[in-house]
Amino acid sequence: MSAHTSPAVTYDPVAGLHTRQVTVRPPGPGEVGIDVRAAGVCHSDLHILTGDWPSDRPLVLGHEAAGVVSSVGAGVTGLAVGDHVVLSWFAPCRRCRKCLAGMAWLCTGTRAVANTLPDGTTPFTDERGEEIWPYLGLGAFTSRLVVPESAAVKVPDELPFGIGALLGCSISTGVGAAMNTAQVRPGESAVVIGAGGVGLSVVMGLRLVGADPVIAVDLSPERRAAAERFGATHTLDGAATDVAAWCQENLGGVDYAFEAIGSPKVIETLPGMLTSGGAAVLVGMAATGATGAFDLFDLADQGKRILGCNYGSSVGALDIPRLARLYLAGRLPLDELIGSVRPLAEAAAAFEDLRSAVGTRTILEP
Ligand SMILES: NC(=O)c1ccc[n+]([C@@H]2O[C@H](COP(=O)([O-])OP(=O)(O)OC[C@H]3O[C@@H](n4cnc5c(N)ncnc54)[C@H](O)[C@@H]3O)[C@@H](O)[C@H]2O)c1
Ligand SMILES: [Zn+2]
Ligand SMILES: [Zn+2]
């Protein structure tokens, strides 16, 4: 096994978004090398470019990806060369209290959110031999990467790589928000604010569990039309409608209000949309340090709840294959979630797709 050099889409606070050659070392003990075949462009990558989540170090961006195992390190038993895998950006340690309790999405042993491998190192160096770090422990906007075995989840070979990529973040987060975090039941009502890759996946999850009605809210007419195709029974223009007033007047409040943008202003309006006993589900990620204000008397008096949702409360090794099976059985219309497919060299345009909320999810192919 030898080191591999290829172009990667990187970000650093000085050079900004950049494509440069990176070298990735071979996998060490407990690690696997992955040939990336498709990577989705998620708003969590954009949060780095906008400075919402400041990074003090150069990163290889990309955390929503699928590919093929190209090499395995010593002691790897669960994966073999040639396996098709979806990468899970919250590589669980499998040893901490949360992992042992079945809550891998809250793993305290992972280093993924510090943008390193579990041992605190990076597998990537740039042309000058300087370290460059894997965003969310992956760094998927390149053709080859190295991850711990727990970050690569085997999926059926017939699963298209683009779908697999989206299963790695937006779909497991969005569908999981409905199924796992909120545990919505048939006939319960829900509103979803923000219909990007994550919000549309919440809509799909709500349809899967039989929620009704499902109201999708976005500023973009294209995204509202997409939400209808994914099962929204109503759509509202967020700029023209007081969504809380609409929910109270038309439905006496909804059982669940999902936010899939990361906007403190929008999050503050969620409890006003709820019926008593309802829950606001925070799926969108706000900027680091953002705070919000709620009507505290109303929350307590009406028994309203606020649920945080990291990674759709998903255990990647269980939920990713489960969602892949549902797709292959025709139960989740995931093909429609893929908008443009672009080469890695068009990363800047792919971020522009995301910013302008045109189409649905953009996939980059190395
Ligand atoms: N909880 C998690 O684990 C997790 C995982 C993945 C992504 N996220 C977060 O989810 C959020 C959404 O990600 P995405 O990739 O779907 O983003 P996106 O940019 O594709 O979608 C956001 C959507 O919100 C819409 N929008 C923006 N402002 C609005 C407003 N005021 N009212 C109504 N609609 C509005 C946009 O038009 C767009 O369609 C981001 O904050 C991302 O970081 C969280
Ligand atoms: Zn993501
Ligand atoms: Zn853990």
Image (cartoon, rainbow, N blue to C red):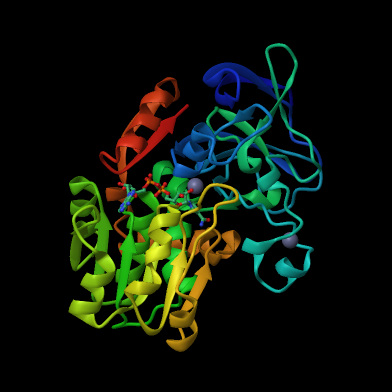
Q: Quadrant of ligand 3?
A: bottom right
The answer to whether residue 12 of the structure is visible from this angle is yes
Q: Nearer the viewer, residue 218 or 165?
A: 218
Which residue is the extreme one toward the top?
A: 128
* Up/down of 256 relative to 237, above or below: below
Q: Residue at x 43, y 30 (%)?
A: 365
Q: Quadrant of the N terminus?
A: top right
Q: Is residue 14 left or right of residue 362?
A: right
Quarter of image, res 140: top right
Q: Residue at x 35, y 36 (%)?
A: 355
* Up/down of 53 relative to 174, above or below: above
Q: Residue at x 55, y 39 (%)?
A: 68
Q: Residue 336: where, in percent of width, then height?
A: 27, 49
The answer to whether residue 148 of the structure is visible from this angle is no
Q: Residue 246: where, in percent of width, then height?
A: 21, 71
Q: Is residue 149 left or right of residue 142?
A: right
* Up/down of 340 relative to 257, above or below: above
* Up/down of 195 relative to 129, above or below: below
Q: Residue at x 58, y 59 (%)?
A: 316
Number of numbered tags placed on the structure image:
0
Q: Is residue 133 left or right of residue 158?
A: right
